[in-house]
Image: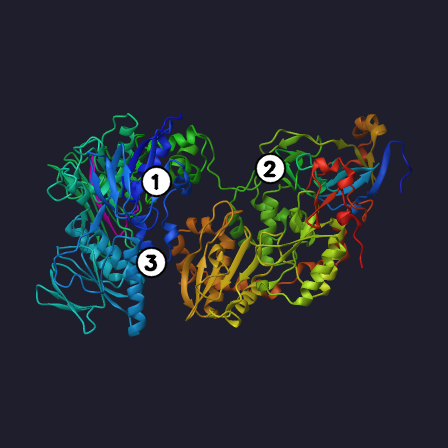
Amino acid sequence: MSRIPSQLVVVGGGMVAQRLVEAVRARDEDRAWQVTVLAEEPRAPYDRVALTSYFSGRDPESLALGAPQLWADPLVTLLRGTTVTEVDRDARTVRTADGRALRYDHLVLATGSRAAVPAIPGADLPGVFVYRTLDDVAALRGWVEQEAARRGRPVRGAVIGGGLLGLEAAGALQALGARTTVVQFGTHLMSAQIDLGGGQVLRRLIEALGVEVRVDTATSRIRPDERGKAGRLEFADGGRLDVDVVVLATGVTPRDELGRAAGLPVGARGGVVVDQACRTQDPHVSAVGEVACIDGACIGLVAPGYAMAEVVVDRLLGGSAVFPGADTATKLKLSGVDVASFGDAFARTPGALEVVHSDPATGVYKKLVVSDDARTLLGGVLVGDASAYASLRPMVGRPLGADASAYLLPAGGSAPVGGDLPDDATVCSCNNVSAGTVRAAVTEHGCTDVAGVKACTRAGTSCGSCVPLVKRLVGEQLTKAGVAVSNGLCEHMALSRAQLFDAVRVTGLRTFSEIMQRHGTAVAGRGCDICKPVVASILASLDDGHVLDDERAALQDTNDHVMANLQKDGSYSVVPRIPGGEVTPEGLLVIGQVAKDYGLYTKITGGQRIDLFGARLEQLPQIWRRLVDAGFESGHAYGKSVRTVKSCVGSTWCRYGVQDAVSLAVLLELRYRGLRSPHKLKLGVSGCARECAEARAKDVGVVATDRGWNLYVGGNGGFTPRHARLLAEDLDTDTLVRTVDRFLMYYIRTADRLQRTAPWIDEVDGGLDGVRSVVLEDSLGIAADLDEAMARHVEVYEDEWRATLEDPEKLRRFASFVNAPTTADPSLAYVAERGQPRPATPDERADPAVLIAGTTLAVRS
Amino acid sequence: MSRPQPGWTVVCQLTDLVPERGAAALVDGEQVALFRVGNREVLAVQQLDPYSGAHVMSRGIVGSRAGAVTVASPMYKQVFDLRTGACLDPVGKEPQHLRTWPVRVEGDVVLVGTAGALVDALVAPLATPATLDATEAP
């Protein structure tokens, strides 16, 4: 289509605006609409729902939503840091604070809410914060850290408001090391979502986290301290509480001022009034999300906002969608406290019955609300154990098919639901994906795992609470389709890598044939290129024998077999280890001379070492003889193993460095060299927060602080780049090394084949928190075992190349031809480029004039 | 050493080959990949990997697929039947097959059949069963 697109202007840059733009770009196939988003915050839309996770180590980037390409579309413009000051409906124009005027054909108000500031004297003092935007959260964090540093004792924090947001804020303060009190006006916590019984159990769970709770308490004043910042809360009952920081979490107010000023009707408690099509009184203006007053109320949840965005887009494209009604189900996102509420949680439906299971001893409260005939599920409250939430929520309004109490018992909580879930039941309310859509992803679109279904349907890609249910549906559907849901490696091995690792560890079998006989399938035969290297890797991790010993040599991929990296023409590249990227001038001269003598193409790698390309099979031992004699060791660039520890120069030279990054990098690299793993492992160490070593792009990243080292894990490059996330802070060197030991060993033992650390962490029970509890708190009781395994690795490490050069039997495999061991592969051909050789292309091979000798005329000096 | 035979080229000793692993050989100026499978059986296919154009097949991992003895190209992991040269898994590409050579193991000597031996080779397994060992790999 070449006609000029219509102009869609979206005021507000939150999650709902993002969803609206996504929906336009996904559905507007004629590209009839050009979208301009005017965002007040200085950044692209982010996951506000996950804001609290910013405290538990996630960085702002990890809150990013959707695919960044969305904003690169020529029909999408995002103006950040842009405040709209006026809507002129007659001229169909919006004006911005920086003096711009934008014409629209259709306008969407997606301005959201602001945190409500209660009319308490002192609410404007320094040290009083709201909890709404990334900037709010960053400011709160900065304040708490500054106060902690100034006072040298834990900061005392108070959260006014004991609702969903208040508890998240309390969790955030706790995570920052503050001693926190939640002050709730009402009778119990989360009173908008759960009943008194659930609230009482919740209170005990929150107190168990170390957070104090005061209910039935009205705050009458915030008093300044001698520095003029918030210092004391005074309550209506005469009580007082000394504080260093206060968070107001008493609710939100729709930001409807643009609508009001433009003369659009607003609701009694605020919000621009819209109809079921999300249109305001002006047909050219819609409102979505928290600013929209629909059915007489504003809804402060993201899922209904998403639904409104879809409705608006459908209408813009000529459809007739209407708002399906709000699913007000909620789940508290607070580590260690499980709370969910869904449907008619307060049993307001006439005749509704409540089935309650309460166990104060274990801190569990579960209530289902059912219809008067006890057959239809109407809603429920789950506190302490919300594992049944994902299964039960889609069943609201449907027959339970079993005795309601069966769903409440600890073990059977979620078991009965799933297979009988109707196709039209919503599984993922964030993205409005039904059970039928999930099933169709398997049956019609060929998805074979949860990751594929998530990519195909978007189910589980926002808040993630439905992922367990999606997983079960996918499993059931695969089983139904006759696809064995196997996590086995290949036709020869029905065990996953992690299962096989455990089996081999326990049985003590140490040869491939024994292992396949014991654990392989009926057709195990001689294995294949999948299972053989896995067994070789497991044996290497358990035993640390030489990779080329005996039968094991036959299991290795060519890279591991000849300890070099196969290149496209059949030659290999050679990477000597340069620990921490630190190399002497003498070392550089040796590498340079070897490269020169063998005519090798030379390039610096991303891991601060030097790669020498174009070595032929039969040249590898000669090349390594010279490198080993000069003190170099194998760099294991060829293995699924620890590669390098990249570092910045650190405090020894750098003006800004606060710790000696190079020494730590060398220590780590020498400790973990040669460690075999499910995939390659990279580490990085930065000497200060400027992070010049890019350690957070590594599987294990260490960043120096004034007080020690911060440890980040799970950074991956490759196809799906991920930033590493904070595992622990301010560790001393011994604790750091022990923690990295355990992290690496736990990964090596339990990850799947070719699974890098980021997806592995996602799959560990409890995610990053789960990993933390295993490696720092020894929750599985395996820490001593992991420590011992790493100690053994360190003890028995030997340089593979040195060992190979000393063993004539091992050197036989480097013959180019079994009947002409030193004859070069006659097919190799090179051309010169920028003064170095590279493999000739097929066209160049046809013209011998351009070919150079390359590595084929190498002479030993 | 056995006597020279027309159409058969002596390539190496059986003990020069590692069980369940390949080795390259030059046979009449051509690059051939030899694989010792089981104890006394040797199979030969072209050393040229048709997908990458590099001479690397001998460096692939030996395995089995539904009963067939296979090698996976070390370059892009296509899987070939070592007895027939047929491509069993083209990894999303058009199937391209490998040329095969007949191989005899006489005593400790490995012989590869060249052009003239083709007819001979067709009957060789029947004619000289004693030279073949059907023992499967462990």
Residue A482, percent across and down? 46, 30
Q: Are marks 1 and 2 in contact (CB under 8 Å)?
A: no
Nearer-the-camera pick, A74 or A125: A74
Q: Is residue A674 left or right of residue A455?
A: right
Residue A262 position by quadrant = top left
Amino acid at pointer 3: Phe
The magenta region covers A376-387
* Chain of the residue where label 3 is placed in the rendered structure: A
Amino acid at pointer 1: Leu
Of circles 1 and 3, the one toward us is: 3
Residue A516, percent across and down? 60, 45
Nearer-the-camera pick, A814 or A78: A78
Residue identified by numbered label 2: A523
Residue identified by numbered label 3: A55
Provide the secondary structure element on which disc 1 rests: helix
Q: State how far apart marks 1 and 2 are (Cα).
A: 34 Å
